Image (tube, rainbow, N blue to C red):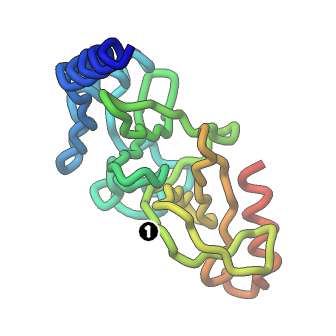
Amino acid sequence: MKTALLVAGVLMASACAATPATQLPAPPTGSTLPSSLTKIVAARWKGAHIDAPPAQAGCASPAGASATAAPLLVTGDFDGDGSTDVAFWAVAPDGPHLAVAIARLGGYALHEIALANPPTIGSISTRPRATRYRRADSPMDWYFGTDTLVVTPCGAAPVAYLWTGFGFDPVALVPTTPASGQTASEAASGVRAAIR
């Protein structure tokens, strides 16, 4: 009996050693997605390309910046597992899609961020883990538990997208400086309305 268990253990150990380890995907370089992720995007949205989304009416470009100043993609550890994830705008014939590719062993898991209708277009950025922020629905200080994707629409307060373990939930952020003549509470009310 002991011999049979020993033989079974040796066979299992050799099978595990013979199985090649699955690698994490390569992170993007500059403003270019890895080819494996480009294929996933092309399969999800026919004719999509990574680009800044079209400017909102009344704005020169997202968040009022020049199109060249807005990053096409941002990276961060959005799910807190220690690997580099990437967020980007995929502009397709049916409109812009905000996507986050979560690095997993062997590839990426693509998540589309649900946007309001009409979509809230804006520049994207990453806020580092442990950065303090204020929610529009709470007077307390909060801290990001992971690197966090933030969309800053033209002329509006930013919206953070927090990882839930299965996807991303929007959280309206209180602007750091209310507009002239506006209280922080009034600014927060405008943010809540923007993400509904």
Residue drawn at 36 percent across, 45 percent down? 86
Residue drawn at 39 percent across, 43 percent down? 88
Would residue 91 be found to the left or right of residue 120 on screen?
A: left
Q: Is residue 183 above or below residue 123?
A: below
Would residue 157 be found to the left or right of residue 185 on screen?
A: left
Give x and y (percent) for residue 116: 68, 41
Observer-nearest of 24 and 52: 24
Which residue bears the numbered disc 1? 128
Would residue 175 be found to the left or right of residue 188 on screen?
A: left
Give x and y (percent) for residue 48: 37, 25
Give x and y (percent) for residue 194: 73, 55
The type of residue carrying mark 1 is Pro
What is the number of callouts on the image?
1
Observer-nearest of 32 and 16: 16
How would you rate the neighbour count of disc 1 (Cα within 10 Å): few for under 14, some for 14-19, many for 20 or more?
Answer: some
Quadrant of the rendered image containing residue 154: bottom right
